[in-house]
Amino acid sequence: MAKLEVHPLMRTIVEYPDADLPRLVYADWLDEQDDPKLAILAEAIRLEIERVSLPPGSPRFDELAARWHELFTRDRTALLPPLPKWAVASVTCERGLPQRLYCTLKRFAEGGARVLDFVPITAVHLAALPDHQAVDAGYAVPSFARPELRRVRKLSVMATLDAPAFVSLCESTAIANLRELEFDLRQLPNEAARVLVRSSERFSRLERLSINSTALVSRKSRTALLEAFGDRFRFKTHPT
């Protein structure tokens, strides 16, 4: 199954993640390989594409869900194209193929981002290290410099960041395609808020900036963010 990693059809799917046709053509190719495992993946792609196109309340939905569960029970590993072992349990799928990746900043910086070149990941959730403190921020610069980020539309950063880490994100050449950006922080340093405001024009395609914090943010910082991002900005304070 290693050949799937370099198949031109998968490359096309990665480049055009919103298009159904390349996925359906890929499913046809999988069937042509006369491999039971690949046939499972082909069927999963087709039924998932059909499922998301159904109108609300369609009786067909339950039928497709039951069939997918049957495939999952038969062989979960067959429902994924080849991935590194660590990534198998770190992705969730949409329309039959991996769509969201969960990993730490450390993993992403040290090569985990390469997964985005092999499967159509468009959402990345960067989690905190177990002992998350300044060590998280140390991986921010290499993480946000990864060219694979250009494929990402939704980026959630749960790791602890400092102001220089915000600078590394905002100055990255790979953020142009972000539609949603979310931070879950213990605090939002005023300097970091200023960095985001100063870089607001770089986020030209951003539709939503969400900041969840366990600490109060100064009124000045919140006002500046609202002025820079308008109704795209959401802030929520939650308890520790």
Image (cartoon, grey):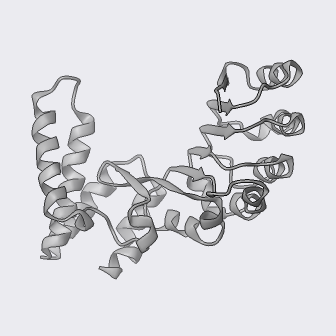
Residue nearer the viewer, 40 or 237: 237
Q: Position of residue 111 (x, y in %)?
A: 60, 72
Q: Position of residue 156 (x, y in %)?
A: 60, 44
Residue 226 lies, with reference to residue 59, above or below; the image says above
Q: Is residue 23 left or right of residue 126?
A: left
Residue nearer the viewer, 165 or 21: 165
Q: Residue at x 64, y 27 (%)?
A: 239
Residue 150 lies, with reference to residue 6, above or below; the image says above
Residue at the bottom extreme of this rendering: 2
Q: Residue at x 75, y 29 (%)?
A: 215
Q: Quadrant of residue 136?
A: bottom right
Q: Is residue 199 left or right of residue 43?
A: right
Residue 64 lies, with reference to residue 239, above or below; the image says below
**Quadrant containing the C terminus in the rendered view:** top right
Q: Quadrant of residue 155?
A: top right
Q: Residue at x 26, y 60 (%)?
A: 25
Q: Is residue 71 left or right of residue 228?
A: left
Q: Position of residue 62 (x, y in %)?
A: 13, 35
**Quadrant containing the N terminus in the rendered view:** bottom left
Number of labels in the image equals: 0
Q: Position of residue 124 (x, y in %)?
A: 54, 51
Residue nearer the viewer, 13 or 93: 93
Q: Is residue 72 left or right of residue 161?
A: left
Residue 115 lies, with reference to residue 125, above or below; the image says below
